[in-house]
Amino acid sequence: MTDPDARIAIAGVSHHTADVMALEAFRFGDEPGFLEAAGRRFRGVLLLQTCNRVEIMVEGDAGALRDFLAGQGRSGFFLLEGRDALRHLLSLAAGIESMIVGEDQIIGQLKKALADAESAGTAGSFLELCINKAVHVGIGVRRHTQINRGAVSVGSAAVLLAETELGTLEGRHILVVGSGEMGLLVAQALAAKQLTAIYVANRTFGRAVKLAEKIGGKAVRLNELYHYITLSDVVISCTSAPHPVIHRADLKEAMRARCWPVEGHPRPLILIDIAQPRDVEEGSGTIDGVHLFTIDDLREVNEQTMSTRRVEAERAAAFVNEELELFIRQLHRKSADDCIAALHTWAEAVRLRERDRALSRLGGADDRTAEVIDDLTRVLTKKILTDATASIRACAEEGDRGAAEALVQALTRGTTGAVSPVSKNTPE
């Protein structure tokens, strides 16, 4: 009976140890292709990619995951397995591991990772169980603590960064590039400010219109992007494009149109790129007047807001630890099911054999007699196995696989076709 919590391994990089360039280098641009390749190696695979983390979860061995990622040209990643991997997953869903501690978006991101794996046929029942448990814990943490009270998302942290840089956003013009989930979070945070104008640009104009209508802003076509950059005090870019959407040469030209008549220097532009991979082309931060910020610069925002949630984070960690123990007991109990099923199959075979022997000895037994003997053997078998089944399951719950195996062997020893608790009847 293999330890069930040893069946999961997680590897990846996150904001804890990697900067924006390292995150970008580690990303997998072709997610379906990656899942297909990994699915040939592992029984279950999920890929979680957000603006500040890339993590791979597999049902399998940590060493095999390390070798697979090395074969994919990846290095410098953390690697967790078993109980540590499960604790990390639950903590992740709880918001404890997030750059902006307590943010809620991670729950939706985990659900999406599972849905993508299901579409690719790589989810597997075990990882599905783990992700569903993590989502349950994440929701429970937010219900039983105040970890997300006053918390900000990455999107609203970007707005707070802009406000810090300018002193106030009142009367400013702000352009949001991207109308996906992150664009919505940015726009919602901006809607609470006393802005003169909010522009929303997106490759699909219809989506820009929908978001602009929600916040009372103006939709902008992407081919008008640099014109509205010229008009704006702040640009926050958060598309899901696989390549830059703001190019250095075009941005430099737009900044010339922002020059002060007398000084010859452009009006300052706060440019915040929270996309992953990055939306702003390399080197754009050297353009005169451009003040470029990336996800790395949001760490300070988290430190500023974290102090108000530190106690709640500690309560959330305690909640996670309690749920982790319950989940591991559940996994242990579930791991015994196949072994117990095999034991009951063995017992049924013995029952039928001995019933038929008894009927043969009676010779010409009528239907009523045969029915009574069948019922008797069935009841005896069930009663004999009831306590044994409960004991095997209890041992498994406590992680005492040796005792569970000994119980099965004690019942089946010396019998042809005896059940082996470490045979193919046991889940890998």
Image (spheres, rainbow, N blue to C red):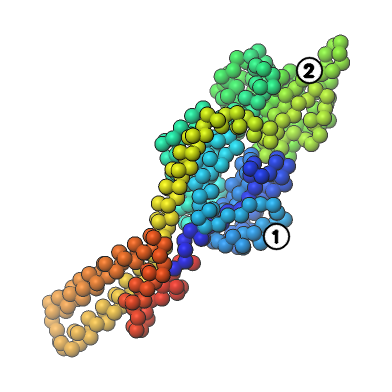
The residue closer to the viewer here, 264 or 219, is 264
Q: Kindly tell me whether residue 30 is visible in this rendering.
A: no
Q: Nearer the viewer, residue 50 or 11?
A: 11
Left or right of 250, for residue 192: left
Q: Residues within 10 Å of mark 2 (few under 14, many from 20)?
A: some
Q: Quadrant of residue 335?
A: bottom left
Q: Percent position (x, y) of residue 178? A: 65, 31
Q: Position of residue 139 (x, y in %)?
A: 44, 39
56 to the left or right of 104: right
Classify mark 1: residues with Cα within 10 Å, few (<14), some (14-19) or many (20+).
Answer: few
Whether residue 285 is situated above or below residue 421 in the rendered picture: above
| First in sequence: mark 2 vs mark 1 | 1
Q: For residue 128, which numbered disc appears in the image?
A: none
Under circle 1, the secondary element is helix
- Residue 71's label in the rendered image is 1
Instruction: Determine the residue positioned at 72% across, 24% down.
Output: 270
Q: Residue furthest top?
A: 262
Q: Can residue 1 be seen in this snapshot?
A: yes
158 and 230: which one is in front?
158
Where is residue 127? Give x, y as percent.
Answer: 50, 54
Q: Amino acid at mark 1?
A: Gly
Residue at which label 2 appears: 267
Q: Is residue 44 left or right of residue 263?
A: left
Give yes or no for contact between labels 2 and 1 (Cβ–Cβ under 8 Å): no
Name the residue type under label 2: Arg
Along the horizontal axis of the image, is 348 left or right of 63? left
